[in-house]
Image (spheres, rainbow, N blue to C red):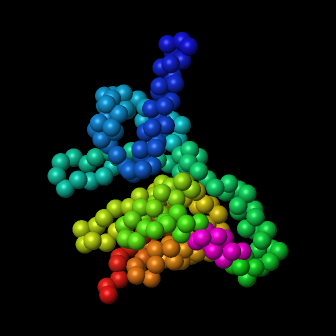
Amino acid sequence: MSRNQIKKDVSISTRRAIIDLLKERGGMDVVALSSQFSLSGMAIRQHLNALKEEGLVTNVVEPRPMGRPTKLWILTPAANRFFPSGYSDLSISLIHSMKEAFGNEGLDKLLDVRNKKMQKQYLQHLGAAAEVREKLEKLAEIRTHEGYMAEVKEQEDGSLLFIEKHCPICEAAAVCTGLCKNELHLFQTVLGDDVHIERGEYILKGGRNCVYTVRQNKP
């Protein structure tokens, strides 16, 4: 392999890693990106400019309480092609076909069957997990495997955030709101009645992530 080819492969690998990091963390400036890749600011800017030319990233200016505003780099919707899509075109076509063949009532029944199947799979994966944090960590594992890039974070007040950074069924959910409605019900079912869960940030409503707040019910 030639030196030029090796250099090209390294550049492609680095740019894909930048895309993954921006997907996970959201907007980042050049300094933060440089520290993650042990590259100079100039090298990072070259990668970002190349990605911008491809329409995969853009930048926004974020005001700061002190000092000059900071330029943050974020992904564009075009970058979603690098992440699981859940066969969106096929899913959307099937949803329209099911509505046409069975009506909304028939579609709801099919979604209920899907929900029960997923509930069984999730409960098996959670196994003997008893604590809420442990259940959420297990849930994050299976959701990440399905392409949702899920993680759990603890808040200062003791509540937990269940965060999904990507939605592989986003296009399908946009034409079938029952998918998201069932998702919230699914989480509540597998986590148990001793917790309260509510959705705050929501990708379909313009949020960067889908974020669920989970609290232990008081005895």
Q: Which of 62 and 216 is in front in this view?
A: 216
The reply, left or right, for residue 83 in relation to residue 27 is right
| Residue 9, placed above or below residue 176 | above
Q: Which of 34 and 123 is in front in this view?
A: 123
The reply, left or right, for residue 102 in relation to residue 36 is right
Is the N terminus in the top left, top right, bottom left or bottom right quadrant? Answer: top right
Which residues are the magenta region?
Answer: 110-120
Q: Which residue lies furthest to the right in this view?
A: 101
Q: Residue at x 30, y 41 (%)?
A: 32
Q: Residue furthest left?
A: 66
Q: Position of residue 76 (x, y in %)?
A: 50, 48
Q: Which of 198 and 122 is in front in this view?
A: 122
Q: Position of residue 130 (x, y in %)?
A: 40, 71
Q: Is residue 174 visible?
A: no
Q: Position of residue 114 (x, y in %)?
A: 66, 71
Q: Residue furthest bottom?
A: 219
- Residue 39 picture quarter: top left
Q: How many marks?
A: 0
Q: Residue at x 76, y 64 (%)?
A: 94
Q: Residue at x 69, y 74 (%)?
A: 113
Q: Nearer the viewer, residue 122 or 176?
A: 122
The chief SS type of the magenta part is helix
Q: Can residue 46 be seen in this view?
A: yes
| Residue 157, placed above or below residue 139 | below
Q: Which residue is drawn at 35% across and 83% down?
A: 217
Q: Where is residue 83 in the image (x, y as percent from the top left)?
A: 56, 48
Is the C terminus in the top left, top right, bottom left or bottom right quadrant? Answer: bottom left
Q: Which residue lies furthest to the front in this view?
A: 128
Residue 112 is a magenta residue = yes
Residue 4 is a magenta residue = no
